[in-house]
Image (cartoon, helix red, strand yellow):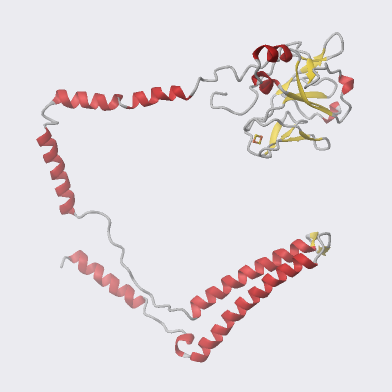
Amino acid sequence: MSQDTSGELEKAQEREHELEHVLRRTDTNPRAAQRAERQVAIMFGLSMLASIGFVAAYVGISKTASINIPIIGSIGLLNLALGLASGLGLFLIGAGAIHWARQLMSDEEIIDERKSFAADDQTRAQVVEDFQQGAEESGFMKRPLIRRTLLAAMALMPIPAIVLLRDLGPLPETKSRNTLWRSGSRIVQDISYKPIRPEDIPLGGLVASALPADLKAIEEEQGTLNERAKASIILVRMAPDEIRSQQIQDGDYQGILAFSKICTHLGCPIALYQQRTKHLLCPCHQSTFDLADSGNVIFGPAARRLPQLAITVDGQGYLVAKEGFQEPVGPSFWERG
Ligand code: FES
């Protein structure tokens, strides 16, 4: 027997000695064991009562009932009762199971030595020898021409797979960066294509969907909704002093702000505007944008703010774009800076 093996055996025996089984009271005293059994059963029984209490609270306590707790303040009595009952029920099952395991289940310690995963020296030497013999027999080292051409062929092998990625579709290039909005594009209502005047939007009001006037002709000609999907905007009006920041200096017109209607997360159209907070909520995954603060994301998965369109009025008093969008609209793609 090698020295290593005998050393390991000694250590194992030492550990076995250290872990010598100490009997519990429940192992030697049947009355203590019965007492522990009753304690476990009581805990499980109380858990059952907690579950029944949960149902009783759900049925019996009014949703509007509340209770005043010092420091915390007023909280709903129903929620408190449901939380306590379900928490207590789970806790008692866990506590009962632990007590059962500690007092009544077998507590004999067993040492199971972990086997080494490493191959022994002899096996490793054999693998190296087999590999060298294989390389020798194949002539891989003796024939440099074959070796080099094989390595070059293997190096080029992944290239066709990379080229095939091109078939995933045309690159969006700048298509998703440009919309129909240009300097002077008149802003019109969706569906009616009626131009909008500032006085059409009361303080605190909004136009949930507006478009550039040019869109109608383009849709009739192309018959697609692509441009509409990119150019849709939402207009909101707030008191100028409620606007905390803007993406574009003086991008509003008398408190009227225009933002892309397309969520920067996955592109859902957004129109859930809360006038009091100035927040715009996307119904798809709850991204929330603060329109009074540059359209910044304040909640949810969207990674970019909602692009703002700078607006003003033309000579006839209709709302128009001052310029195109300065940031790409719609979902964040890999090609966007
Ligand atoms: S598409 Fe708006 S949050 Fe996902």
* Residue 323 visible in the snapshot: no
Q: Nearer the viewer, residue 303 or 172?
A: 172
Looking at the image, residue 118 sits to the left or right of residue 74; the answer is left
Q: Quadrant of ligand 1?
A: top right
Residue 37 sits in quarter: bottom right
| x then y, percent, for residue 337 | 57, 23
Q: Residue at x 14, y 44 (%)?
A: 130
**Image height of 65 relative to 40, above or below:** above
- The residue that appears at 69% across and 25% down in the rendered structure is 307
Residue 315, given in percent of the width and then of the height, sits at 85, 8
Residue 203 vertical placement versus 4 (above, below): above
State the residue in front, 147 or 195: 195
Quarter of the image containing the N terminus? bottom left
Q: Nearer the viewer, residue 82 or 6?
A: 82
Single out the residue that lies furthest toward the top.
315
At which x and y percent is residue 244? 78, 30
| 63 lies above or below 300 | below
